[in-house]
Image (cartoon, grey):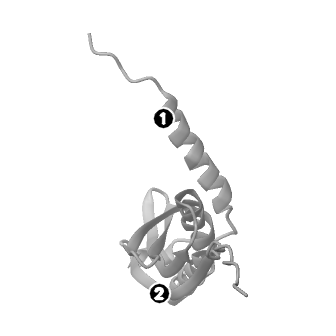
């Protein structure tokens, strides 16, 4: 009796965190120590950027979440903190569009709590109250980026006269 061949099953998608690490850290207090004598509450500005790169053909990617927190009082910089929180992630058996979504949504969402803790603890060590980064929707930012890319691709090319 011969066995009939089994149909090939598609490989299962895989996602794993291989390593979480602090790639870069910067703290500037350009007006110290005089800035500590001011009682004015500073204005806080937070910017967040995420990026990713393929490390090897075995599905390893590096994702980096960069958070910059700037505090200013009366046009003077109180402090500037920049944290580049990174991770190495293994992503296998996904179509390219889904890999892009994992890198743009899941990876930065995974890195955010680490960046949040680093920013808060660094500022406390520097003599300031902590700035606690709020939860952010990387999905909304990713969808907006896709929308902008689609608009750019749909725009007619300029004509040369």
Q: Which of the image's four quarters has the C terminus? A: top left
Q: Which residue is mark 1?
A: 152
What is the secondary structure assignment of the residue under circle 1?
A: helix
Q: Residues within 10 Å of mark 1 (few under 14, many from 20)?
A: few
* Above or below, comparing residue 57 to residue 118 in the picture: above
* Above or below, comparing residue 74 to residue 154 in the picture: below
Image coordinates for residue 27, horizontal then vertical, percent: 41, 78
Q: Residue furthest right?
A: 1
Q: Which comes before the other along the chain, label 2 or label 1? A: 2
Residue 101 relative to residue 73: left or right: right
* Above or below, comparing residue 51 to residue 140 in the picture: below
Residue 52 relative to residue 17: left or right: left
Real-space Cα distance between discs 2 and 1? Answer: 35 Å
What is the secondary structure assignment of the residue under circle 2?
A: strand
Q: Residue furthest left?
A: 161
The residue that appears at 47% across and 76% down in the rendered structure is 59
Q: 121 and 148: which one is in front?
A: 148
| Residue 136 seen from this side | yes
The residue that appears at 57% across and 72% down in the rendered structure is 107
Q: 160 and 9: which one is in front?
A: 9
The residue that appears at 63% across and 72% down in the rendered structure is 10
Image coordinates for residue 48, horizontal then vertical, percent: 53, 63
Question: Is disc 2 in contact with disc 1, using a CB cutoff of under 8 Å?
Answer: no
Image coordinates for residue 50, horizontal then vertical, percent: 50, 64
Q: State which quadrant residue 128 falls in.
A: bottom right
Q: Which residue is mark 2?
A: 21
């Amino acid at each position: 009796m011969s066995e009939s061949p089994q149909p090939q099953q598609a490989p299962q998608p895989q996602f794993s965190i291989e390593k979480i690490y602090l790639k870069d850290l910067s703290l500037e207090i350009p007006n110290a120590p005089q800035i500590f004598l001011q009682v004015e509450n500073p204005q806080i500005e937070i910017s967040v950027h995420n990026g990713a790169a393929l490390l090897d053909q075995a599905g390893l990617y590096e994702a980096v979440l960069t958070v910059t927190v700037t505090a200013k009082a009366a046009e003077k910089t109180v402090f500037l903190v920049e944290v580049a929180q990174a991770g190495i992630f293994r992503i296998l058996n996904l179509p390219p569009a889904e890999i892009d979504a994992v890198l743009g949504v899941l990876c930065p969402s995974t890195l955010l709590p680490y960046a949040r803790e680093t920013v808060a603890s660094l500022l406390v060590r520097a003599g300031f109250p902590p700035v606690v980064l709020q939860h952010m929707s990387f999905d909304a930012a990713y969808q907006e980026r896709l929308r902008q890319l689609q608009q750019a691709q749909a725009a007619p090319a300029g004509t040369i006269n």
